[in-house]
Image (spheres, rainbow, N blue to C red):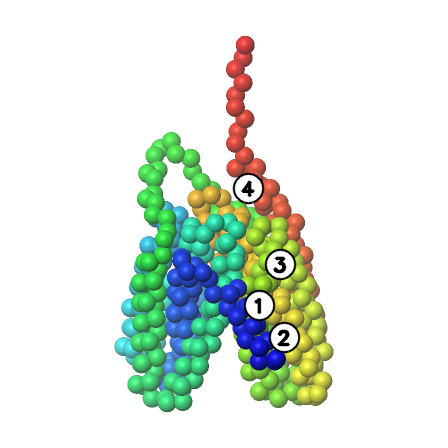
Amino acid sequence: MAGNRAVNAVRTWAAETVPAPGPARRLAVLTVVQSVGFGLFLSSSAIFFRRSVGLTAAQVGLGLSAAGLAGLLCTVPIGRLADRFGARRPLITVYAALAALFTGYCAVGGFAGFVALACAISVCETSSHPLRMTLTHEVFDAGARVRVSAQMRSLFNLGFMLGAAVAGGVLAVGGRGAFVAMILLTAVAHACCAVLTGRLPGRTVEAAPAGPGAPKRRSGLRDIRFVTLSLLCGVLELYQPILTVALPLWIIGRTRAPGAVNSVLLMLDTVLVIAFQVAASRGAETAPGAARLLRRSGVLLAVCCLVFALTQDRGPLVAVPLLLLGTVLLVVGELGQAAGSWGLSLHLPPPGRQGEYQGVFALGRGLQQTVGPYLVTALAVGAGRLGWALLAALLLLAGLVCPPLAGAALKTRETAEAPLPEPVANP
């Protein structure tokens, strides 16, 4: 009986998560291939840079920080290209460039070459997400976009886990040959992504010439409500450095729980995202529904921070159950944050400007990736329970502000799109 229930659960998950044949299925294959390459490289790259290239830890950190900044600066300009020419062609170019750039790592022998390649790769990788979201907007109708995005996130985590497992074998073998093979496999994965993207449908629109009488559009960066929502979503995305940076340091430095429990928490997060992201995304099909998911996410993430604070100085019997409970709350908040972010980023941009606005929305994530690890470490690990409480207050406030701000942004967009009344002729 238990075996039958497990089989039925897997079938139900597969039916919800694996798209039907067609564009969504092809996008799913692309997502898995990319995520396998991403997991393979990310799980072993730091050791490659240290052991094979010969960089110091400080050089690796400085180079990756510079790369993050380069990626952050280029998302909006590349998003505008998607509005001009459709998302498919820029995305093919990005994947082809990544295949070449990753191959270039095999020839890197010093810090300058590492920084140059890392910056170029970051520009392409950071841009690929808003381009994929723009392509999702172009290919699928409004009712399917959030669901397809949720399916892709579940499959991305599955592929990432597979890639990380292969990377574990690379690390076990060691030696430059194994690392070079890992890099070349990553490059091949991105080359396959370029081919798979070419098989997807997409909008191909040439830019209309801007004549002297053409109206000048305001930059998406001047859309204050949308920019603020992107930053709030970035704040709620602090769940990521909490899980991957703050919690490991907290466990070994502020609790008496075994350090190995951190691996259990990471695995729990990955499995729950794979299993429940699609189901947790229901309700994000509209902008108000997406904003409500973000509000709930803020509440759950705030509670999880308070639960983690209770583990300070606690032994394994108390700390481990609380860490597991806090992680479950964090994952449920994470699922809502992801779905709510997709909903707002897909529903709120003006017609014809999805690419630019996806680039703007990516700034919130980029800012979180830049300051998030330091912020959560300084608050949670540095200040203990008080720091967790401050972090909880920040997350709660970010979640509560989203619904009214999204409502105002939606009203502004609807007003701007409303047709002007026909002039009435005087008798």
* Position in image of residue 151 (x %, y %): 50, 63
320 left or right, relative to 416:
right
Callout 1, which amino acid?
Answer: Phe
Task: Report, in whole angstroms, how far the alpha carbon at label 1 lies from the one at label 2.
Answer: 15 Å
Whether 389 is drawn above or below 346: the answer is below
Q: Residue at x 39, y 76 (%)?
A: 41
The tag earlier along the polypeptide, 2 or 3, is 3
Tell which tag, 4 or 1, sits nearer the viewer.
1
For the residue pair 198 and 185, the one nearer the viewer reads as: 198
Callout 2, which amino acid?
Answer: Thr
Task: Report, in whole angstroms, how far the alpha carbon at label 1 lies from the one at label 3.
Answer: 17 Å
Q: Residue at x 70, y 72 (%)?
A: 306
User: Could you tell me if the residues under marks 2 and 3 are in contact, i.e. CB atoms within 8 Å?
Assistant: no
Callout 3, which amino acid?
Answer: Leu
In the picture, which quadrant includes the C terminus?
top right
Task: Report, in whole angstroms, how far the alpha carbon at label 4 lies from the one at label 2.
Answer: 37 Å
Disc on res. 413: 4
Q: Which residue is mark 3?
A: 294
Q: Residues within 10 Å of mark 4 (few under 14, many from 20)?
A: some
* Position in image of residue 269 (x %, y %): 57, 74
The tag earlier along the polypeptide, 4 or 2, is 2
Tell which tag, 1 or 2, sits nearer the viewer.
1
Q: Residues within 10 Å of mark 3 (few under 14, many from 20)?
A: many
* Position in image of residue 331 (x %, y %): 60, 70
Q: Which residue is mark 1?
A: 276
50 left or right, relative to 403:
left
The tag earlier along the polypeptide, 4 or 1, is 1
